[in-house]
Amino acid sequence: MPRVRRVRGEALLALTLLNIFVLVTGVVALDVLEAGPLPSTPHPVTDAKGAASVESAVSSPADPERIADALDDPMSESGLEEGLSGFVVDGMTGEPLFDRDAESPAVPASTTKIVTAVAALSVLGPDHVLSTEVYLEPEADRIVLRGSGDAMLTTDTDPEVYPRRATLEELAERTAEALAEEEITSVSLGYDDSLFTGSETGPGWKPNYVTEGSTAPVHALLIDGGRVDPDVSTRAPDPPLAAAEAFIQKLEEAGVSVEGDPSKTQISGEAIAKVDSPPVSTLVEFMMLASDNNMAESLGRALALEKGEEASFDGAAEATQHVMDELRIEGVQIFDNSGLSTKNRITPRALVELVELAGDPEHPELNATVTGLPTAHSTGTLAGRYSEFSPAHGGAGLVRGKTGTLEDVSSLAGTVHDQEGNVFVYAFMANTPGADGPQLDLLAATLSRCGCS
């Protein structure tokens, strides 16, 4: 077998096994439209004993005919025959094993975030950070809070939460120190949300996405993903203003007197304090695990700015498309970076190729795309799936995948290994009335117990 494909497959296997045994903490949220965030608690792997016994060497490659036979019954019984497509390749060799309309574009829902992850990591690099800054206008005794799109920005420091986030508490303390050096004890506050331009909601977004809490309107300045509280899905009507008001509270706790209400403005003067987000690799993992829509849109705009495009839906989509062209990935057409848009179209083959690319040792900068994939019955948006009450339970701990859910749309793409040591990279997409995640879970679970060598 070609060495590059073999090494890439071994890298995918190593990444898969590594993350099966990692305890992941942090807010995880279902990507279904009704969902809100789950508590910040560890999600230990369950039912992964099979994974521990899998050898990295495969005695013989998987047989495409046996793969097709294994998938035939669950596909027929899924009720998704008319709108179901899929693609499976051997993760060790890259050889196609199963193809059902793999070149047919489908609405991808949140599997769009695989595209966003690869594009953002490719352009920005895994170590890039988003900085929330404070500027001083000394002649006016005014400071200005400027957002950069850090959707993980929060109010208070919590050392028990992973990953550690940038906080308004820390920013206020640094601002207070800088003001003290200038012998300024009282200021007014402006806030600058101008980095992102254009519409606050995307092409093909339904009006209820915001009211149901699936996303906040897209802004460069927001805290807790625009939520009114970190532990609920309800979004603030004006996320930048809510962030500014929260910052006033933290400034006053730090000993700075703030006069009047915050006012919307644009920065001038000198930057005197900042807090940095976690690196983009961590932002991508968070986005993938939680299927966080605001993080996806922020990353899209960050890469748009890096590519010289407007930080808008159109600019981010254009920049992302350029990256796909540079990487020679065909079959991707997007209008947003989160996957909420019903206009997006991606082929199963493109999703598989992106996951393969992210596991390629020649592209270590893209690895967070794979390490961020949720694990069945353990982490992220798959934590509540593949349970002992599910017919897909055999895939618990063995299936890893990015989920996607919209009305009459379900998708799942990622990696899976079976008891014989085969590693598969797969994508299943359903665009048909009544499509839901558990129907696709059974297909991925079938691969995990295939025994198809």
Image (tube, helix red, strand yellow):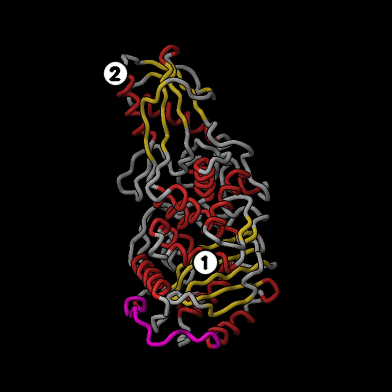
Q: CA distance from mark 2 to mark 1?
A: 54 Å
The part of the chain drawn in magenta is 50-65
* SS label for mark 1: helix
Q: Residue at x 61, y 53 (%)?
A: 340
Q: Quadrant of residue 304?
A: top right
- The three-letter amino acid code for the residue at tag 1 is Glu
> Please, is residue 231 above or below residue 107 in the view?
above
Q: Which residue is mark 2?
A: 181
- Disc 2 is placed on an element classified as helix
| Picture coordinates of residue 446, whole percent (x, y) | 51, 80
* Image coords of residue 407 (percent x, y): 66, 60
Q: Dot 2, how many residues are within 10 Å of its Cα: few (below 14), some (14-19), or many (20+)? A: few
Residue 111: which quarter of the image?
bottom right
Which residue appears at 41% of the width and 20% of the height?
136
Position above or below: 414 against 272? below
**In the image, is residue 324 above or below residue 252?**
below
Q: Which residue is mark 1?
A: 353
Foreground residue among 3 and 398 = 3
Disc 2 + disc 1, Cβ < 8 Å: no
- The quarter in which the C terminus is drawn is bottom left
